[in-house]
Image: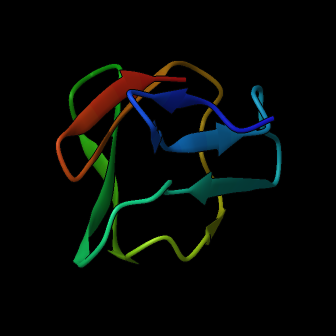
Amino acid sequence: CRVSLAGTEVPQIYPNPAVHTLYLQPGTQSGSGSFEVWNAAGKQVLRTPVWGSYPVQVNIEGWQPGIYFYRINGYSGKF
């Protein structure tokens, strides 16, 4: 299911909760940017490039269970 806001698809991160792999579908953004993730203590645990609407796959097997916060080209949220 794609989510749109004012005609623009917004980024999706799935599955939630994730165990081995996390997927990011950036939406309909153009250009390049980055996908950044921080743990609940505020430590950045990931920074990877995002190119337009191309999906990103992240191996999270070594991450501790918990709440993580993310930012993508001005979008922000938590998972």
Residue at the (30%, 72%) spot, across then down: 30
Q: Residue at x 27, y 66 (%)?
A: 34
**Residue drawn at (17%, 42%) of the image:** 74
Can you say whether 63 is above or below 31 in the image? above
Q: Is residue 69 above or below residue 62?
A: above
Say left or right for 63 vs 50. Answer: right
Q: Quadrant of residue 49?
A: bottom left
Q: Nearer the viewer, residue 35 or 73?
A: 73
> Image quadrant for the C terminus?
top right
Q: Which is more toward the observer, 17 or 77?
A: 77
Q: Which of the two residues, 8 or 51, is positioned nearer the viewer here?
A: 8
Q: Nearer the viewer, residue 42 or 70?
A: 70
- Locate residue 4 relative to residue 16 in the image: left or right: left
In the depicted structure, whether residue 72 falls above or below residue 52: above
> x and y percent of residue 53 in the render?
49, 70
Is 4 left, or right, of 69 in this rendering? right
Q: Work out which quarter of the rendered image holds the N terminus and state it.
A: top right
Q: In the picture provided, is 7 more to the left or to the right than 41?
A: right
Q: Quadrant of residue 33?
A: bottom left
User: How was this image coloured?
Assistant: rainbow
Rendered location of residue 38, percent (x, y): 31, 38
Residue 35 placed where, x, y %? 35, 58
Q: How many marks?
A: 0
Residue at horizontal 82%, vertical 42%? 19
Single out the residue that lies furthest toward the front.
Answer: 7
